[in-house]
Amino acid sequence: MADVLLTLEALRYEAGDRALIRDVSLRIEAGRRTLILGPNGAGKSVLMRLMHGLIEPTAGRILWNGGSGAPVQAMVFQRPVMLRRSVLDNVTYALYLAGVPAAERRARAEAVLERVGLSPLAHRPARVLSGGEQQRVALARAWALRPRVLFLDEPTASLDPGASAEVERLIRVIADDGCSIVMVTHHLGQARRLADDIVFVDAGRITEHTPVADFFAAPRSEQAGHYLRGELSWT
């Protein structure tokens, strides 16, 4: 039986008088690629930010490793922020903030840039790179932290097909390195290619959490069926 990495218990999040997440309970297993799908405004990104700890729930609780404490985690957004530094320095600065000893930072950063294919660009200013290259820098920066879980919020939404394919390849490589993946996407083909399981969110509630093949073959919830048939918003 797989280890449970993350447990959400009766999680709720309110903004003003609106409940954006409504009594969500969920268990995410370690070593899985869990992709979150749902229509526009369903609460996908809010749910991910709650998991990562960027925002605090109004009610309910989040348990890591059965309550033994949160592991190292990282997050990559749709439009990553690049520092006014070289590609290499973007990675080493993240390691500095994480408390990695100075003697180790450069070697670790150079190794991860090699693995994502960016070594030739290591000394270029990160902000002059293409969108796809910047997203690969963001993935390298996150991966260098050696997280146990990587959160990805629509990391290919603004990329062309070639750059998207390269980011998907890197996500697989990072997952194969032992990192659990939790990712929001609006792209059904991408979900088929990357997911082990699907969490479907609608109106702030999880209507199903199921293996990817089962989700696409026979969704259990009416809302998911509508979504797959194109009867709900895809973004």
Image (cartoon, grey):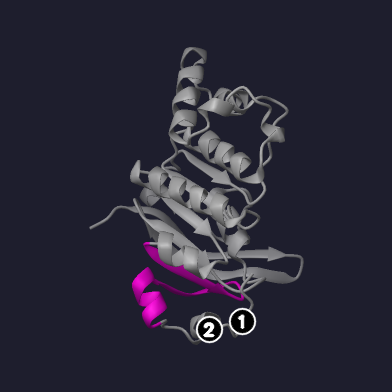
Inspect the image, locate mark 2, and give the three-letter code of the amino acid beneath it.
Answer: Gln
Is residue 83 rendered to the left or right of residue 57?
A: right
x, y (%) of residue 134?
62, 40
In the foreground, 16 or 6: 6
Residue 149's place in the image compared with 121, above or below, is below
Q: Position of residue 130 (x, y in %)?
A: 66, 41
Name the residue beneath numbered marker 1. 232
Relative image position of residue 119 (x, y in whole percent)? 51, 27
User: For residue 137, what is the image quadrant?
Assistant: top right
Q: Residue furthest right?
A: 16
Compared across the picture, whether 1 is left or right of 69 comes to: left
- Residue drawn where x is 62% and y is 60% of the image: 46
Q: In the picture, which quadrant includes the C terminus?
A: bottom right
Can you identify the residue that label 2 sits on?
223
Tell me which residue sits at (52%, 42%) in the image.
74
Chain-order first, disc 1 or disc 2? 2
Q: Residue lying farthest top?
A: 103
Quadrant that contains the N terminus: bottom left
Contact? badges 1 and 2 (CB < 8 Å)? yes
Relative to 170, say whether 223 is above or below. Answer: below
Q: Is residue 89 visible?
A: yes
Give the residues drawn in magenta, as a range: 196-218
**How far, Cα to Cα, is label 1 from label 2?**
8 Å
User: Residue 15, which numbered label?
Assistant: none
* Quarter location, residue 26: bottom left
Is 209 within the magenta?
A: yes
189 magenta-colored:
no
**Is residue 204 or residue 136 the one in the foreground?**
136
Is disc 2 surrounded by few (<14), some (14 to 19) or many (20+) residues within 10 Å?
some
Tell me the SS state at disc 1.
loop
Can residue 25 be seen here? The reply is no
